Image (cartoon, rainbow, N blue to C red):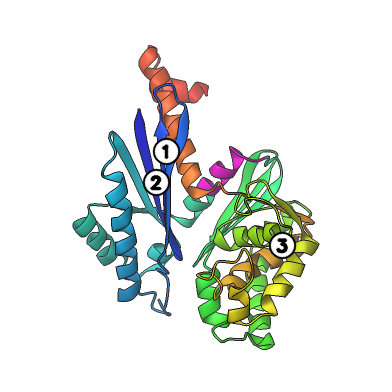
Amino acid sequence: MENFAVIDLGSNSARMTITQIDDDGAYSTVKQMKEYVRLSENMGDKKVLQPDAIDRTMRALKSFKDVYSNMSNLRLKAVATAATRQASNQKKFLKQVESQLGIELEVLPGTMEAYYDYLGVRETLPTTNAVILDTGGASSEIVLVQNNTVSHLISIPLGSVNLTQGYLPTDPIPAADLFNAMTFVNDVYNDIWWLRNGLNLPVIGLGGSNRTMAKINRRSNNLLDFEDIHGYRLSRHSVDETFSRIVGQDLEGRKAIPGLSKDRADIIVGGLVPLTLLMRYLDSDRITFSNSGLREGILFEHLREQRIQNVHEKSNISLKDFLTQE
């Protein structure tokens, strides 16, 4: 039996999932943790991680370590995404995390982050033909899936925190600021030459902002366990209606919306701009929400590697030959 812990240090939140993997390959989630760290806050044009954001992050990572350190036969994979990826003081930050906490963070390239998103979705939802959108705090990952295969993927440097700080910093949000933010995102989409190949395909939404869209709708429909959004579907009309409702409120009004976390109320408009515009850009009529993404993708990759290793140990064929056969 193995306890496999995955830490995902994002731009807005830090998350950890610990999965117990039995010797026969069966697995179950034994612990999940989340802390809002706003690591990308106030990075500015020079992309410098700020002391307050680093302190919040270090406290969150320590709380994770306090939990997994008590578990037997633990294997840890800790990854960092957009904020750390973009940071000019990245090396100093990584050394601080390793020296003070003993955690070695792997900085994922944007394309690898997108691929792990795909793995997490593919194993848990139908993805024959779809466009996957993962909106984070400082980046968004887009994956075009055609005939059950990744056709194209990309990571673009726009997310809930940096769009808010760059275009939507005031409250209430002026119409001109919202227009400028939407124009910027639309221009980014226009520069992705293959994105039009996803015309009319359904969207699969990941990330805190997109999942919040589902939670708000589930709460408004009085559905039990409103946070259980995996596989939940919404029409584009419902997405537009909900976005309009959110934009029409000031910060205090957004904090009062059922299903919308108060910790996310200040960045939710920026966080939903990529989704609403992508659905329009693709003329997509629906979105399916996924609770599986990066961390689950890493888990599924690990499970596959274990299966391969087990077969290799029980046979005389080489690992290279087995991979070729698979």
Q: Amino acid at mark 3?
A: Ser
Q: Between residues 45 and 221, which one lies in front from this camera angle?
A: 221
Q: Label 1 near label 2: C-beta < 8 Å?
A: yes
Residue 52 percent location from the top left of the image: 32, 75
Instruction: Please check the rendered image and state whether residue 120 is part of the magenta-colored stretch, yes or no.
Output: yes
Q: Secondary structure at mark 2?
A: strand
The residue labelled by disc 1 is 19
User: CA–CA distance between discs 3 and 1?
Assistant: 32 Å
Q: Between residues 211 and 133, which one lies in front from this camera angle?
A: 211
Provide the residue span drawn in magenta.
115-125
User: CA–CA distance between discs 2 and 1?
Assistant: 8 Å
**Image side of residue 61 versus residue 19, left or right:** left
Mark nearer the viewer, 3 or 1? 3
Residue 175 percent location from the top left of the image: 69, 86
**Sooner in the amino-acid sequence: mark 3 or mark 2:** 2
Q: Is residue 50 visible?
A: no
Residue 41 percent location from the top left of the image: 42, 74
Q: Return the mark for residue 6.
A: 2
The residue labelled by disc 3 is 220
Q: Amino acid at mark 2?
A: Val
